[in-house]
Image (cartoon, rainbow, N blue to C red):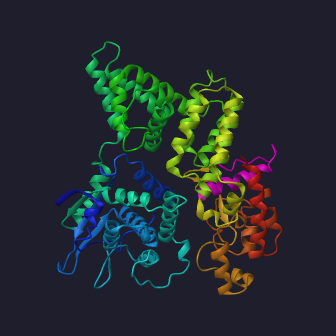
Amino acid sequence: MIKSVGNDPVYKLLSSEDTVIYQIPKYQREYAWSRQQWDELFDDLLEEEDPSAGHFLGTIICINRTSNTTKENVLELVDGQQRMTTVSILMAAIYKFLNDHIDQLDADEHTELNNLRRQLILKDPIRLRVRPQIQNSNYDDYLHVLKSSGLDVKAPPVKFLGNRRIMKAYNHFGSRIEKQAGSKLSVKPILDLLTRVKRAILVKLEVESTSDAFTLFESLNNRGMQLTPIDIIKNSLLAAADKKRHSSFTADHVFDQWNELLSDLGDDYQTQERFFRHYYNAFKDELPTVSKAPIATRSNLIRIYEKLISTDVENRLADILYCGGVYRRIIGNLDADEQKNDLDEAFADLARVQGAPSEALLLYLMTYRNDLHLNDKQLTTITETLTSFFVRRNLTGDPATNALQRLFMSIIAEASEMSGQAIVDSVRRRLRKVASNDTTFYAKLVGPLYNENAVVTRYILIALARESMTTETFTDLWEREGKHFKWTIEHILPQGPGLPKEWIAMLGGADVAAAIQQQHVHRLGNLTITGYNSTLGNRSFQFKKNRKDSKGNFVGFKNRLPLNDDVVQATEWTATEIEARTEKLAKLVLKLFPL
């Protein structure tokens, strides 16, 4: 079934010296990765301690579809299209930067740039090395990425290209690359990034047929997944206990404690892994020294814990177990009957704005709260400050993701010498120093906010809605019904294609309506909160305003949330109304999330 297995770096898979291309079959879903996954890839590459070692990207499954070896060798990419497409988009963004700053390159670096070009396209005739599937203009979008990067590629017109996912990935990587290059736009860090990309490792499994590919794919996903770092840490603990042969510290005892820890952390693997990274980063100065591990990352986690476990397994496990209990409260993994207070609500808000990188700081402060003379009110203030910071950070991108852990580790070092209110003031001062200012934040708030970060946008809208609630009118806008939120973001002017005739007439004709939709649809002023209702969608303004459910309750804009009052009072909804409401809400958001 499996013809060959290769543990290959990207530079070999996309060698500038061969004609191998990767073709994604048309039945595959369209490109789906988002900003979080783009940043994870970018940051994982940067955090790799030894660029020559190669960051592991995962597995791809291919079928050889070559019909003419003299023209090109065609590998059909049955699994791994998201990774391969994303890596090639990142390479195109790197090519764009280096080509724009070609005057900084020496002779060898010129050769490197030429090789990069051949890793993206073949010539005579021009052909793509990675060929996305054609559905929903995916292939055409990718052509525009290569054309924008400066490669000699022709691309057909695509409507609303800037709002489409492949081009957004390319633009996002371009922004990250410019930040990585620094204020002087130096090519050196970008050449280093290119080295890291080219040396990243993919396991390529080549099979004979589509049926073999799907059988293998199912096996890998359901039965054959490799051990995770968490599995290996657990096995290391059990092995260490077995070697001790201590009457009270047995493998059974370790297994029971491990299960207690996982009960605190919950079932989500990412949360479990995050805890082990945060534990090391929070208490690094107190732990045994691990060489070449200034910070815990996904790639060095196993090596770190092998060292920690080998040094003092009994005390280490006891300490991890205690901190797991502290972390349980930070992540809100509480029982339904446990009493919650303002601090717990602050923790929940921090999670809602994707503030997980700050959990190392909170783990340290919560663990040593008595020694540091911190009470619940002060810890709540610190957590609310972190929430304000992450609302800004996750919209503006400043500071960069790969700088966050070192930031919070340095704040821990500073806080360890302080106590009480001095720690609160120090955290606020340090975050204010590195966060985007109000001018930059406001510029994001009045732009296509939903496109920047839909999760944080939802939090902002709910925060705005909660501001005008009283005890009598309180509504839990985070309540869930099954797997989805009961209250969701609604685009007032619909975001989908095929605007109804009522909207087209209101906006001044089809061309004007399309232009307004493209420019304004994802702005804060065009967004609100309504009850979950899939029937609103593309309906007319009046319908969405007056919609009721089967019980006669308003589920459209007349749902009694003060956030919607100005929408309800409007007789029409055009660019003018969206602009005015955007500016009004943006100013309120500045007041809600100060630093």
Q: Is residue 455 magenta?
A: yes
Pick whichever, 503 or 559, lies toward us.
503
**Direction from residue 367 to residue 189 in the image, left or right:** left
Task: Identify whether 537 is placed above or below 349.
Answer: below
What range is drawn magenta here? 454-478
Q: Residue at x 61, y 21 (%)?
A: 371
**Direction from residue 167 to residue 50 in the image, left or right:** left
Can you give x and y, in whole percent of width and height, for residue 495 in the image? 62, 72
Question: Is residue 593 visible in this depiction of the protein?
Answer: yes
Looking at this view, name the residue that lies furthest to the top. Answer: 247
Task: Identify whether 161 is placed above or below 39.
Answer: below
Q: Residue at x 32, y 82 (%)?
A: 126
**Direction from residue 251 to residue 581 in the image, left or right:** right
Can you give x and y, in whole percent of width and height, for residue 311 in the image? 35, 23
Q: Quadrant of residue 503?
A: bottom right
**Direction from residue 332 to residue 382 in the image, left or right:** right
The N terminus is located in which quarter? bottom left
Q: Quadrant of residue 291?
A: top left
Question: Is residue 334 visible in this depiction of the protein?
Answer: no
Can you give x and y, in whole percent of width and height, for residue 39 in the image? 48, 56
Pick whichever, 27 or 559, lies toward us.
27
Can you give x and y, in whole percent of width and height, for residue 372 in the image? 63, 24
Q: Residue at x 83, y 68 (%)?
A: 569
Q: Quadrant of residue 505?
A: bottom right
